[in-house]
Amino acid sequence: MARSHTPTRLAGPLQAPVHRAAVLALALLLGACAGQAPDARPTAPVSAAWKSAPPPGWISTADAPKDWQEGRWWALFDDAALDALMGRIEIGNQNLALALANVAQAEALLRQAQAQQWPTLDVQLGAQRSGRPSAGSGTLQAGASWAPDLWGRLADAVQAQGARVQASRADLAAARLAAQGSLANAYFGVREADAELQLLDDIITGYERAVTITQNRYSAGVAAHTDLLQAQSTLANARSSRAALAGSRNSSEQAIALLVGEPPAQFALAPAPWSAAVPVLPLTMPSELLLRRPDVASSERAVAAANANIGAARAAYFPSLNLSAGLGGKAGSLATLASAPTLAWSLGATLAQTLFDAGARDAALDQARAAQQAATASYRQSVLTALGQVDGQLNAMAALSQQIEHARAAAEAAAGAEQRILNSYQAGLSAYTDVVTSQATSLSARRSVLQLQVQRQQAAVALVQAMGGGWQAPWGVAAS
């Protein structure tokens, strides 16, 4: 049987190859005139140096140890228990799981945007049989369509979504750094509480001896009853302080449990010695924060996405071209369908242009521009906030170092005065109120040293977070 074809059918108003060529030439000409969205990195007010000087001995990021370069900044504190807890964040922290899911969603949306740039193909096969043995039919319908991205609208959409993917990855890094910083702060809080509880236990033991001594002196008629009551009150206050501190430790321990994704009732951190030392940390220069702070990098990527959206909004002013092709036919069966004389094919091209939309496209372009301005303002504010946080923590570190030196000297002097006054009281030369006052002063001074030391460690953690924790935007590394 001879194969026959139906004549070529052109869909739409274009009826001749000459017209199609003219339309394509016009499309290319208009495409050359279409403006692309700006993609320049927004400027931000960045200082040349920090207002507060870093502590002595700090190093630059170029000479930073491997742990810092790999984002394992907590390893600089050289604490095996802290290192083990940090590894559990990746497994159990639900805020991190949420950020990871957001990255997966953004990547899926990027693949969808990229797919819009390609033709779509579809095919339908059908078979039908009636009541008679020889009666039946087969049908075939195949089609293809493609809308060439003449004005870059789809390319801009891909670029915008690609920037959103990068922003979501920076958000993931920010969520990870926030969880790590919160865990480190809670961990150091637990360890400081262990040290302070040990101090209070020693103090309580001494107060118990003081009560015994005063009781004996009172029984012997040497001390007044008020002396015994004051000694007992001092002991009770110390025990009350210990109970409050134990409750604070439990709260920090519960915070760690939530950060690693465990029920607080199933998590416990055994008491252990505490090293209050602060490691030598690498210092990031102000200009480096633009690519080392995840939140700043995310804000910059939001600006890039807004720039691309401006290009997509501009493309709406130009006509759209759609190319289509089809193949179909019907035969007595699927086996004979390919040679059926009714098999026909068609080609088509459609050019569409909006002539009046009551200013909708103008409004969409204005909205895109306003969104870009808002994203730029947010980016610049994030840069200023980052600079302020680093300078603030540098100042806090310097102030805490000086406070600790003075607090240690005060604690040593208070301890000496306490012992002298206690000896004087036992010799009958001082009133017990002087003993109570000296004991309270000494205890407060010794606890103050521990509290200032943990504040300095937590300030170091905050400074690490302010500098980005060793993270660097991958797209910034590739560009450099």
Image: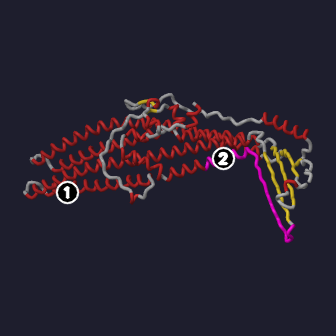
Q: Is residue 68 left or right of residue 46?
A: left
89 or 5: nearer the eye?
5
- Tell me which label, 1 or 2, sits earlier in the chain: 2
Q: Is residue 107 magenta?
A: yes
Please name the amino acid that badge 1 sits on. Gln
> What element does badge 1 sit on?
helix
Seen at 72% across and 46% down, the residue is 116
Give the x, y percent position of residue 363. 74, 45
| Count of labels in the image | 2
Examine the structure image and report whether residue 387 is included in the region drawn in magenta. no
Q: Residues within 10 Å of mark 2 (few under 14, many from 20)?
A: few
Of the residues shown, which amino acid type is indicated by label 2? Arg
Query: Residue at label 2?
Result: 111
Give the magenta range: 105-134
Residue 226 image offset from top left, x and y in percent: 16, 56
Q: Is residue 365 visible?
A: no
Dot 2: what SS? helix
- As drawn, the residue found furthest toward the bottom would be 131
Task: Give 236 or 22, whichever is nearer the viewer.
Answer: 22
At horizontal 53% and vertical 46% (from top left) the residue drawn is 172
The residue singled out by tag 1 in the image is 232
For label 1, the crowd category at 10 Å Cα-Cα, with few meaning under 14, some 14 to 19 and many 20 or more, is: some
